[in-house]
Amino acid sequence: MSVSDDGEDIVSVEDLSVTYRSVYGPIKALGGINLKVKRGESVSIVGESGSGKSTLGLATVHLLPQNASYTGGRLMLDGKDVATMHGRELMAMRGNTAFMIFQDPLNTLNPVSRIDAQMLEAVRSRAKHDNTSFNQEEALKEAVQKLEDVRMPDPASIIRRYPHQLSGGQIQRVVIAMGLLMRPKLMIADEPTSALDVTVQAQVLKLLRELQREYNMSIIFITHDINVAYGISDRIVVMYAGEVVESGPSDKMTKNAQHPYAQALIKSVPTTTKKQGRLTAISGSPPNMLNPPSGCRFHPRCPYVMNVCTTTSPKETIKDGDAVRCWLYG
Ligand code: ATP
Ligand code: SF4
């Protein structure tokens, strides 16, 4: 959503649609998505399970599964159209412009290769891309330095281990350090802390926020937890049933959300940002994306539903600097 157009956009999404082929029929996981992420900005994507958060993350780095296609609009990453990238250009983009970390970081690492070998490989690949020389001793020093940057205790010893000899939190730090070796402009983190225990979760979130500032990186942080989003991001984007329903500055979104779904989402979780009454569950269930509701997709669950909501999909409206998709606002 183009709330403000100043500053350099690392991600610029206009009217994006992504559709999965399935045996039951097409699933339009994303429709009419508009989003901008500026250089050095941290943006959280929040929503219930199935709202399309991961699909948006994967689409941003062209990592969609084989049964998915870009079916409309445009997604520009660092000025290049992602949907048309292939081959070497795609590999270079994934390493050097953007990297993605997942909920289960172990899948990113090779289980039979030591951490030092995997980190050296990352530096070698960067040198190849930049057309610079590769010096093993210097590369190893840089790898240890990156482990220090991610606040890894005893990096010189950790780097000689295999992935199975590390804890979940240590593995996530190694994956982040490997990403940093590539000097990316954007990091996409898809629920990177949900497999970790609460204390380690807090440490990794703090680390990501610090690294984002130190490296002037942009972050797209995918989470179902609005509190986590508030803690880590400058801006929050709320998704429902494959659409962005509201976006705005984190502070404003958590204190004064406009869209009925965003308001319900905030009321359904305990928050540390303000005094809260009783927590209330969002009534009804998320829609079946094979056959989503007509008009506003949230209408079967919305306490403010009007006739127009059941037939006609609302367009985005910019209100007080926030972008909202709801008939209550025009
Ligand atoms: P979660 O928080 O549970 O990961 P999400 O918000 O990330 O959910 P997505 O995983 O992006 O949502 O899914 C969006 C929609 O696309 C859902 O309806 C989901 O069932 C569907 N979907 C996701 N992956 C596939 C796939 N490989 N094939 C078919 N449909 C898919
Ligand atoms: Fe509710 Fe209508 Fe707004 Fe949808 S458009 S959120 S149904 S008021």
Image: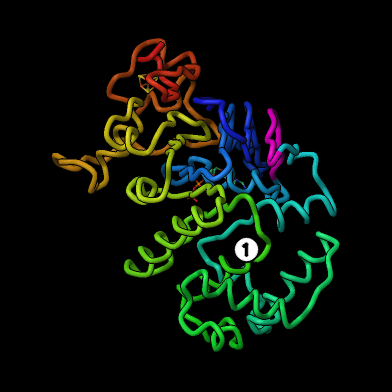
Question: What type is the residue that disc 1 sits on?
Answer: Gly
Q: Which residue is mark 1?
A: 179
* Number of numbered discs on residues: 1
For the point 44% across and 50% down, the residue is 223
The range drawn in magenta is: 68-78
Question: Residue 241 in magenta?
Answer: no
The image quarter containing residue 178 is bottom right
Above or below for 202 versus 97:
below
For the point 44% across and 31% down, the residue is 247
Residue 265 seen in the current view: yes
Residue 172 seen in the current view: no
Above or below for 177 versus 19:
below
Q: Is residue 248 left or right of residue 108?
A: left
The image quarter containing residue 201 is bottom left
Question: Residue 75 in magenta?
Answer: yes
- Residue 160, image x, y percentages: 61, 88
Using the image as rendered, state which of residue 112 and residue 5 is in the foreground.
5
